Image (cartoon, rainbow, N blue to C red):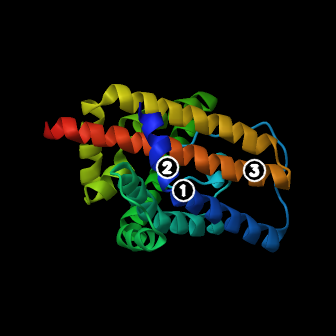
Amino acid sequence: MPLTQAIRCLRRNLIIAFVPMLLDLAILALSVAWSGWQLTSQWSYRIVLEMGLPSIMHLYNLPFTWAQLLLIALWSFAQGGYIKALATACEGGSVDADQMVRNSLAFWVPFLGLNITVLLAKAAVSSVLIMQFGSIGAGASLLAFAVLRIVFIYLEFTIVTDRINFDAAFRRSAHYFKRNWPSALAMAVLLLAASGVASLAANWFAAPAAVILIIMLYSLMMSLLQTALMLTLHEAKRWSEG
């Protein structure tokens, strides 16, 4: 079972979960120092479509600001090192901070380009559908993006493990999905469902202690699930090389 194997892999390399945890805690501390505590309890949720480096910020429906653009640059930098660490752990290796930094530097620009492209595409498509069809358009855009996320669930992983640019990774990640679609589909649905539940909790429990606890639990949960997803990618590659 991928989850059972993932527990063993992650237990040997807990730095994988600690990195996003520490980044989120640092971002939270800077945010509070800059503008005070702004979070309030509300009934809201967001299905996380971003794969790779997890962040509690993905769980909130935040308006676009220049600060968010800075966060995208930060996440883009850390993304390559985080994903390569997942791959190394699944191959039985050990991960250290120096390796993560080197891989982050190697993949920073490709992921920055990918993240900005996806952000602009999502904004454009959602705006057109909402203007044309109102709330139905909003639901349709969410469904469309969720389906695309499932089909291209291996996209970010493929960029790092195969060391190819993101346009080539679209085709290859879809190929890997088709080679191992039952496991890939199950993990994709589990990731989307888990992120939805986590988003509900993050938006409802807004006290400082609760947010800190959610950051720690979310980093551990998503790192475990994405380690399992990486294991299914390795399985798909073996079948492709077959």
Would residue 165 appear left or right of 100 to someone viewing this image? left
Q: Which residue is mark 2?
A: 10
Element carrying mark 2: helix
Q: Nearer the viewer, residue 135 or 226?
A: 226
In the picture, measured across the screen, residue 143 lies left or right of residue 106, that is right
Tell me the kind of residue under disc 2: Leu
Residue drawn at the location 37% of the way across and 29% of the way down: 183
Label 2 crowd bin: few (<14), some (14–19), many (20+), radius 10 Å: many
What label does residue 213 carry, if any?
Answer: 3
Residue at left offset 32%, top offset 28%? 181
| Quarter of the figure with the N terminus | top left
Q: CA distance from mark 1 to mark 2?
A: 6 Å
Distance (Cα) linking label 2 and label 3: 19 Å
- Residue 177, x across and y down, in percent: 30, 35
> Quick one: label 2 or label 3, which is nearer the N terminus?
2
Say if residue 152 shows up in the picture: no
Horizontal placement of 167 versus 190: left or right?
left
Task: Say which residue appears at 23% left-offset and 41% top-offset.
Answer: 237
- Left or right relative to 97: residue 27: right
Q: Where does residue 24 sit, x and y in percent of width and height? A: 65, 61
Q: Is residue 83 visible to us here?
A: yes
- Whether residues under marks 1 and 3 lie with C-beta atoms below 8 angstroms apart, the answer is no
Q: Which residue is mark 1?
A: 14
Q: Are marks 2 and 3 in contact (CB under 8 Å)?
A: no
Where residue 195 appears, x then y in whole percent?
60, 39
- Residue flagged by tag 3: what amino acid is it? Leu
Looking at the picture, which amino acid does disc 1 mark?
Answer: Leu
